[in-house]
Image: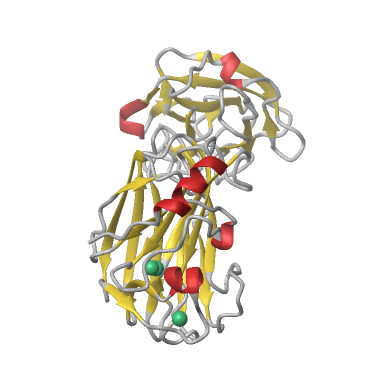
Amino acid sequence: MKRHVSLFSSAAFLLLAGSVSAQNFNIDVGDTFSIGHPSANYGAGAGQAGFWNPVDGGPPYQFTLLDLNQQATTVTTDCQGNGGGGDFYSDNGATTGDDEALLDDLQDIGGVGGVYTWTFGNLADGFYDIYTYAWAPDNPSYITNITGGDLGDMQPVGGTAWTGTHTQGGTYARHCVTVSGGSLVQIEIANSGSGFGSLNGFQIVERLNACPGAEPGMGFCDCTNSTSACGTTGGAGNGCANGSNPAGAHLGASGVADTAADTVVLEGSGLVPGQPGLYFQGNNAINGGNGVTFGDGLRCAGQGVQRLQVRAADATGNSATNTSISVGGGVSPGDTKHYQLWYRDPAGSPCGTTFNLTNGYTIVWF
Ligand SMILES: [Ca+2]
Ligand SMILES: [Ca+2]
Ligand SMILES: [Ca+2]
């Protein structure tokens, strides 16, 4: 049985928050017990008031979420893993009211080795902060490790008594994630190596700005899967060896792959100093993403090729684009495009062809 927020509090919230986006969610995990879920005016650590979805019953915890106004959405939850598994409740003496309703019931992640991955599907493309509550009401000295977001960083949560205030690291982890091309959001909750792991709930908060430190896409087609025509390889994530750098040249990127506000910069490194290279775009990842031999390297991106910009490497072998990639490539929202940098290597080219390429790089635009 699900419990429902009182009509009075939800109606009042509707009046206050009628314009809130449907892509923000509050989730109370393990809500099987008599304490119920928090009221709609409870903002918890994110300061995001609104309806709290009661999500219970043990793995796989498959639900379709209601938004902050308690209106239907298509956003889904799923939970897979092994360890403890089910709903658990312990009345912590320090917690009361809405704090207790969120924290004192939870999913038991289990003892040493317990690990579960939660997946959120059908979120609209954009940027989100995911607050993952992982505080143990039965023994606040327990620590649970939360991993996820664009950076894939692990954040330990817990180890401290309830102070009356939610804090990052004390009661929740916070990860920024970019949803692009309908990508899933995955958060791993794991026992830290002692005691028991806990998952009290989540808040999903859409943000206006891109996630800090994250790249707008992913590399593919490095010269460790295939080799050059003369058998050379390159370092992991790089193209094949060149005359200046036996680890080969690397293509990465920074910025936001938003066609309405494109700030993507393609960035080459490990290039031949002073030599020009052509940044280009293709519609396909060639040969299943492994590329085909071309010059001293591999051609990874092809079909419908768009030449974007010629840039010379500086004295340290770096170069970067300074023109709009989405305009130069004729990109539309939802497009998946593949990028590569084709550069000159006139002296010491390992295979003698005098040109080479970086790894490929894939961006899903929104
Ligand atoms: Ca609850
Ligand atoms: Ca309590
Ligand atoms: Ca809970």
Percent position of residue 36, x then y: 36, 67
Q: Nearer the viewer, residue 82 or 174?
A: 174
At 56% across and 22% down in the image, what residue appears? Answer: 259
Can residue 319 be seen here? The reply is yes
Q: Nearer the viewer, residue 60 or 245?
A: 60
Percent position of residue 2, x then y: 27, 59
Percent position of residue 249, x then y: 57, 38
- Image-quadrant location for residue 86: bottom left
Q: Nearer the viewer, residue 21 or 156?
A: 21
At 42% across and 37% down in the image, what residue appears? Answer: 221
Render colour scheme: secondary structure
At 61% across and 43% down in the image, what residue appears? Answer: 245
Q: Is residue 3 above or below residue 218?
A: below
At 47% across and 66% down in the image, what residue appears? Answer: 133
Q: Is residue 292 above or below residue 81?
A: above
Q: Nearer the viewer, residue 270 or 65?
A: 65
Can residue 113 be seen here? The reply is no
Q: Residue furthest front?
A: 8
Q: Residue furthest right?
A: 315
Q: Is residue 310 above or below residue 155?
A: above
Q: Which quarter holds ligand 2?
A: bottom left
The quarter in which the N terminus is drawn is bottom left
Count of number-bearing discs: 0
Q: Is residue 101 above or below residue 93?
A: above
Percent position of residue 364, x then y: 46, 30
134 relative to 117 in the view: left or right: right
265 relative to 116 in the view: left or right: right
